[in-house]
Amino acid sequence: MGLVVKTKIKEYTQLNVGEEFSRAFERKVENLLKDAEERAKANGRRTIYARDI
């Protein structure tokens, strides 16, 4: 999907970022987004808010 950019991750850490980490982080973000979308829909909204995380 491309939600996570490896170079951006590296801006927040002094350590190297492995490819496995990038893929796992991407899946985590996708799951957070999917769950937030489901909460918003369950509440009859078409907008995702921070409270949906």
Image (cartoon, rainbow, N blue to C red):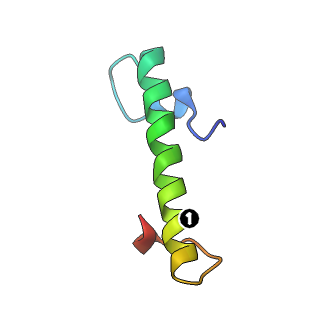
Up/down of 1 relative to 42, above or below: above
Dot 1 crowding, Cα within 10 Å, few <14, some 14–19, many 20+? some
> Which residue corresponds to the image point at 41% horizontal and 23% vertical from the top-left?
21
Q: Quick one: 19 or 15, which is closer to the camera?
A: 19
Q: Position of residue 46 (x, y in %)?
A: 65, 77
* Residue at (35% x, 30% y) in the render: 13
Direction from residue 25 to residue 6 in the image, left or right: right
Reading the image, the residue beneath label 1 is 37
Q: Residue at x 39, y 36 (%)?
A: 12
Specify the quadrant that holds the N terminus. top right
> Does 23 sit above or below residue 47?
above
Question: Relative to 44, is 53 on the left or the right?
Answer: left
Hey, which residue is sitting farthest bottom in the picture? 44
Corner quadrant of residue 34? bottom right
Camera-nearest residue between 12 and 34: 34
Q: Amino acid at mark 1?
A: Glu
The residue depicted at 44 percent of the width and 41 percent of the height is 28
- Please state the horizontal and vertical placement of residue 27, each as a whole percent of the image: 49, 36
Residue 29 lies, in percent from the top left, at 48, 45
Q: Is residue 10 visible?
A: no
Place residue 48 in its image quadrant.
Answer: bottom right
Where is 26 relative to 16, above or below? Answer: below
